[in-house]
Amino acid sequence: MSAENNGELSPPLQAIKIAPDKPGQNQREMILSGEKTLTVRAGSRDHWKGPVMLGCEIEPWAVMAEIIEIRHCLLHDVTDEEVKADGVNGELTGLWADLRKYYPEMTLLSPVTVIRWANVRGKLVNDYRKSKGTG
């Protein structure tokens, strides 16, 4: 055991699966650029603040980040800022339409978990920044 954690076990690595890219919706690039900094998921999820792997197993890629905020609410309580940070153009109704693709029974009164991350890092991030001249 390392001295860093005073003999305590580290929590297991948590992961958030990101949907594959679709025409007009490049989730990976939005995460790498910092345009997408959170996700809204159906139900009450048990994520915690700390390291998280964001990635897609269908189009294999992954990056590390830090979960900095978790909020449980009803879908209609998701703020305009959160909708934008999820990478959705428009209003809450746009987010609702996107979520119904994955959760067909979702209503505006459905419970959701808002998960916000920061400090996205890894080789993909470094390569992306170099390609854009920002790293």
Image (cartoon, rainbow, N blue to C red):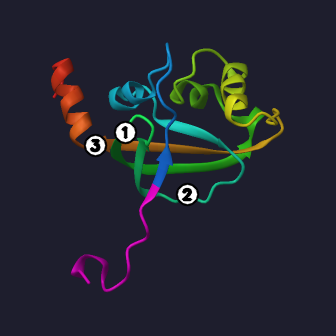
30 left or right of 91 in image: left
* Percent of width and height locating residue 31: 40, 31
The span from disc 2 to disc 3 (Cα, nearest Å) is 19 Å
Q: Is residue 10 above or below residue 38?
A: below
Q: How far apart are labels 1 and 3 at the CA level?
A: 16 Å
**Residue 47, label in figure:** 2
Quadrant (top left, top right, bottom left, bottom right) of the N terminus = bottom left
Residue tagged 3:
121
Quick check: is 6 in the magenta stretch? yes
Give the magenta-colored segment's residue range: 1-14
Label the magenta part by its dominant secondary structure.
loop
Camera-nearest label, 1 or 3:
1
**Amino acid at circle 2:** His
Q: Secondary structure at mark 1?
A: loop
Disc 3 marks a residue whose amino acid type is: Arg
Looking at numbered disc 1 in the image, what kind of residue is underneath it?
Answer: Pro
For disc 2, the neighbor class at 10 Å (few under 14, some 14 to 19, many from 20) is: some
Report the mark closest to the observer, 1 or 2: 1
